[in-house]
Image: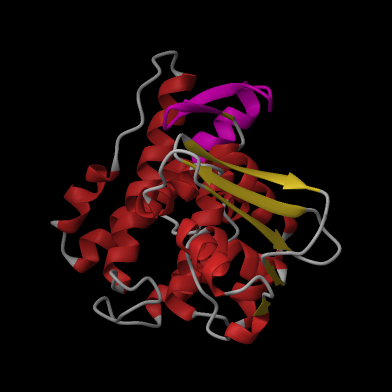
Amino acid sequence: MIPSHVDEALPELAPFVHAVQARRPDDGTWCEAWTVRDVLVHQAGNAEELARVLQAFLDGTPVRTRGFDREAPYRRMSDSELWAAFMNRCEQLAETASAAAQDLAPDTEVTWTGRTVKAPFFAEHMREELILHRWDLTGDDRTAVQALNEPWMTEHSVVSVGRPLLARGHTGLDLGPGERVEGRLRTPGTDDIVVTAAADGTAVRFAAPEGPATIESDAAVRVLLLWGRRPADPSRWHSGVGPETLRRVRALLGGY
């Protein structure tokens, strides 16, 4: 049973919980290197770190964001211990986010992974993680597609996360001086998302639709592409730019 205050702060927790409970810990997922247990380890680490950084800011003693080595203690837990820890960390995050909503103005800036984000980011980011990693478990079921289609999911991915989504793909492209990759991800009726990469860095931004799209899709698929995922049904996206351009843009969209 999820406490009401946790459900209110993290409404995507219940669908994620149901998806995990319907599977074995060693079941595979759409994230090819992870089992269900690996996803749960990652989520426990996410919830802990989001709460830790936000609570430290509230206490007036800001801390640096730790890397994914924060997940190591959870990997040593039994399945039952891991489950209890995950639920506890989500409750802690919900309570910390509620305290922040009372004590901080919404535009208060807090440092997270070397950049600044607004205070509401912390609960919202966990919500996005719950949606994305539930998709890793279930694929394109109705609940996943509806959640991924929500406009705030696209907004959060581009504005609140942004360039980190392109870091791994950028490294893999190994661009030299003067080389450049640019792609337009289009969902009809919305602004395009433009992703670019050159030897000295990357960028991701919204822009008015202009010229041909590199990839056109529904909003849910576009979020998946930004996070380095692929929908089960490839006919949900379309492209007319040719294989070389498409290959380079798809390589840039490597997620992390």
Report the front residue among 181 and 4.
181
**Magenta segment includes 214:** no
Q: Taking 151 as reference, is 165 left or right?
A: left
The magenta-colored residue range is 95-116
Give the image's coloring scheme: secondary structure
Q: Position of residue 122 (x, y in %)?
A: 53, 39
Residue farthest toward the left in the current orientation of the protein: 76
**Magenta segment includes 104:** yes
Q: Residue at x 64, y 65 (%)?
A: 222
Q: Residue at x 25, y 49 (%)?
A: 71
Residue 13 visible in the current orientation: no
Q: Residue at x 63, y 70 (%)?
A: 221
Report the front residue among 13 and 84.
13
Q: Position of residue 245 (x, y in %)?
A: 57, 65
Q: Position of residue 46 (x, y in %)?
A: 38, 47
**Vertically, is 175 above or below 145?**
above
Report the front residue among 178 and 92.
178
**Vertically, is 138 above or below 256?**
below
